[in-house]
Amino acid sequence: MDDYASPGAVSARHNALSRREFLRRLAVVGLAPAALLAACSQPAAAPTSAPAAAPTTAPAAAPTTAPAAAPTTAAARTAAPAATTAPAAAATTAPAAAATRAATSAPAATSAPTAQAAATAAPGQAAQVSKLTIAAVQGNEDQALKAVAPLYQQQKGVAIEIVEFPYDQLYEKLVTTFQANTASYDLAMMDDPWMPKFGTSGWLQPLEQFGFTRDPDIPPVVYEVGTWPPPRGPVPPSEKGKPQQLLGITIVGNVEIFMYRKDLTPEPKSWDDVLANAKKLNKPGSMAGYIIRGKATNPVVADFLPMLWSFGGDVFDTSWNVVIDSPESLRAVKFLVQDLKSVAESGAENVDAADRSRLMAIGQGYQSTVWPAEVTSIVENPQVSQVTGKVGYIPIPAGPSGKGVGMMGNWLLGIPKASKNGQAAADFIKWLISPETQKTYVEKGGIPSRKSILNDPALNQKQPFFAALAKSLEAVPNWRPRTDQWNAVETILGTNLNGALAGLNDPEAAMKAAAEQIRNQMKQAGY
């Protein structure tokens, strides 16, 4: 339970809806706190155990830490993988509840692709396939995937087996499976920061060979995040000169956006407006003018990066020079740890995404950044929220640079190199992202990236953040630096940033220390 409500942030003064009662309501609607955390943040710590079915020792080249993505609670870290086969006519179990049960039950038997794996179809021609197996993350991210999978068998005659793993275990499982070049999975669900490792290692099949072309209804940045080497920003030294290939297609179109109480003020246009409104509405003990997600490592970095970019700062320049201690970056750091902290909740250095959503939902926070899963699961969920219909959603406000920059947190589907069912797997992806399927996918809680879906007036009535998400994608959000060293870099930056937020160090000293450590890390990695 402490993973959900941090003692330093959610104190007894937040009594409009007690932590116990809030969690009880979450349980009633089938939402596990671990699933919420998995949907809106990423771990900075290394996995502590391998999944039940994984080899007991990882090959020498396997990374010892997962790239930054969803945090995993103690329960999730010990969870066994769960296999879900989507029968043609059977109803799909409620996704959130299924994820909770999977984390506490014995592992289900997972069958590898059957006889259909014996034949490899030529590009453009799918062999006769009866089942496709998907390795997926366990949590909110795959609930819509599980919900629509039975339709594929009904329409195409191909069963979809979804094998779920908690976040860090999924990364470990994919790495060891890919290194062994075994055809355990036909499709793999991937967090976008994993692309540097998977792309550099050549573990995924290029999708162009299966007839993928760019759809004008899907923003270009959605294709770019699944392309390796990266089409913009710094390119790792080992990848320079390599041809760009599409290796993954987005199925969860996450972009970090901004939320505020629209019943209290007009929308903020800039970070200056954010601070002014925070000062006006901050009431210690009853409402925080700004909710800082300040927990060490990934949480505080995820909260900070859109602010950093909007202030004209960055972690690296286009040549991999460390610039987190530049004047522009320092200005953003001071804005967070001095200006916003003065109007934030107490104990901000301990607050994670679930704490942020809860404070917003019980009316004790005015504004903050937010991931879509927090909106659907908590802030706009009438069974747990007291502010439904009162919150506005907009792209990240503009900084001194004159623009606001969101951050991508997409989940993609890719086809492992070892899969013998490449064309059949590609056909499933095409079906999943088609306009017709996406309508059903959204009804089941999926986060789309199609402009026509995000801008649909009727859907915006049901999902009030869709318009902000559409604008954020069109404005070209940024992604975390495309390097397999990002997890280490994020840990360094997040530790020092959290220390400054907690008052253990001043901003200049904290960023000087972070910059020096990051430079050493990158130098050792050959940058």
Image (cartoon, grey):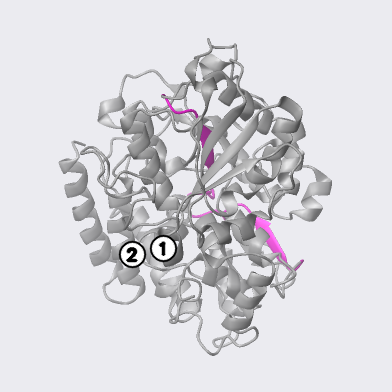
Q: Which residue is located at x 40 percent, y 59 percent?
A: 77
- Report x, y in % for residue 228: 41, 27
Question: Could you tell me what secondary structure mostly forms the magenta stretch?
Answer: loop
User: Is the residue under label 2 in contact with that under label 1 (CB below 8 Å)?
Assistant: yes
- Label 1: element kind: helix
N-term mark: 1 or 2: 1
**What's the residue type where badge 1 is placed?**
Val
| x then y, percent, for residue 58 | 26, 43
Inspect the magenta stretch and tell me whether residue 401 lies in it. yes
**Residue bearing mark 1:** 300
Q: Secondary structure at mark 2?
A: helix
Q: Quadrant of the C terminus?
A: top left
Residues rendered magenta in the picture: 389-417
Q: Would residue 339 be counted in the magenta stretch?
A: no
Q: Which residue is mark 2?
A: 497
Q: Is residue 269 visible?
A: no
Out of 300 and 195, give the one closest to the viewer.
195
Residue 195 visible in the displayed image: yes
Q: Looking at the picture, does residue 342 appear above or below residue 71?
A: below
| Front residue of this view, candidates 303 and 207 | 207
Q: Which residue is pictured at 43% across the width and 46% down the height?
A: 170
The x and y percentages for residue 453 are: 74, 40
Label 1, residues with CA under 10 Å away: few <14, some 14-19, many ≥20: many
Figure check: 38 above or below 185:
below
Q: Position of residue 285 (x, y in %)?
A: 55, 88
